[in-house]
Amino acid sequence: MAITEQNIREYFNHIDEYALKDLEKMLECADYTSNYKRLAVPIALTCFSLLDMLGFLIMDFGEGPIEMTKTVRNIKCSINYIFPNNFNDEQIRHLVKLFRDGASHEFFPKKAAICNDKYDEEILKTENFYFLNVHPLAKKIIEKFSKEELIRLLYSDKKNTIIRNFEHYIKELENLSSNKLTKGYIPDFSNTTTTTTVSSTRQTTNIWEPK
């Protein structure tokens, strides 16, 4: 599949309409008057997913192989883009291992916590206990990865990098859908059947039925 600028613009539009709008809505719905219901972990996981994917898209691999699976490296790239000179490599590695991995696998990170407070600091420390404050992180992601900013990146000196990496991303998806272990279980939104109900006939989509 030949990737065009329009394909990438459409992808950026999906990032804006789904992921960033979700972040905005979670920040809006968080209950800042309570110690609970602040949606800190869902916000953190959304942030790390965006940092991982968008870091990969803007990563300059030079002449080397393109790899999507290096999460720490991808997040380092996007963190350095959003917060230039704020974090060193060791801090970013701990950021990923402590908070991203901790929230993904256990919800509660070990020797750390995730909070959502309206402070400017992303990392808070009390004695030997670390807090990731997702509020300023999410705000910065919404600002720096808005549709307008991503399109500006697409037409900057990163254009060829983004196109090359996005082509690799699409190929990975195509390889996944043709893999013998997953073939037939990847959602196929073009496969529709007619289902008759008592009151009406409607179109439904069989996206999980093995072929």
Image (tube, rainbow, N blue to C red):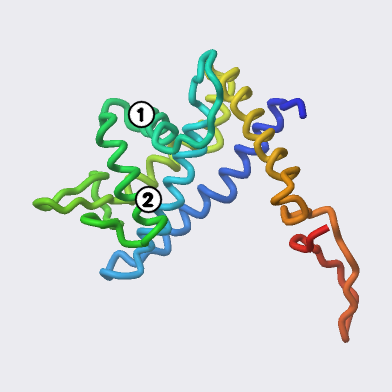
Characterize the local packing of mark 2: few (<14), some (14-19) or many (20 or more) Cα atoms within 10 angstroms.
some
In the rendered structure, which disc, 2 or 1, sits on the residue that comes first in sequence?
A: 1
- Residue 189 falls in which quadrant of the image? bottom right
Marks 2, 1: nearer the viewer: 2
Quadrant location, the N terminus: top right
Image mark for residue 80 = 1
Judging by the rendered image, the residue that carries numbered circle 2 is 101
User: Viewed as shown, does residue 112 lie left or right of 70?
Assistant: left
Assign a secondary structure to mark 1. helix
- Residue 194 falls in which quadrant of the image? bottom right
User: Viewed as shown, does residue 158 lie left or right of 1?
Assistant: left
Residue 173 versus residue 180: which sits nearer the camera?
A: 180
Q: Horizontal and vertical percent for residue 68?
A: 53, 34
Seen in the picture, residue 209 relative to 22 is either above or below; the reply is below
CA gap, disc 2 to disc 1? 20 Å
Seen in the picture, residue 90 relative to 36 is either above or below; the reply is above
Q: Horizontal and vertical percent for residue 87?
A: 26, 32
User: Viewed as shown, does residue 27 lie left or right of 201?
Assistant: left
Quadrant location, the C terminus: bottom right
Assign a secondary structure to mark 2. helix
- Residue 5 falls in which quadrant of the image? top right
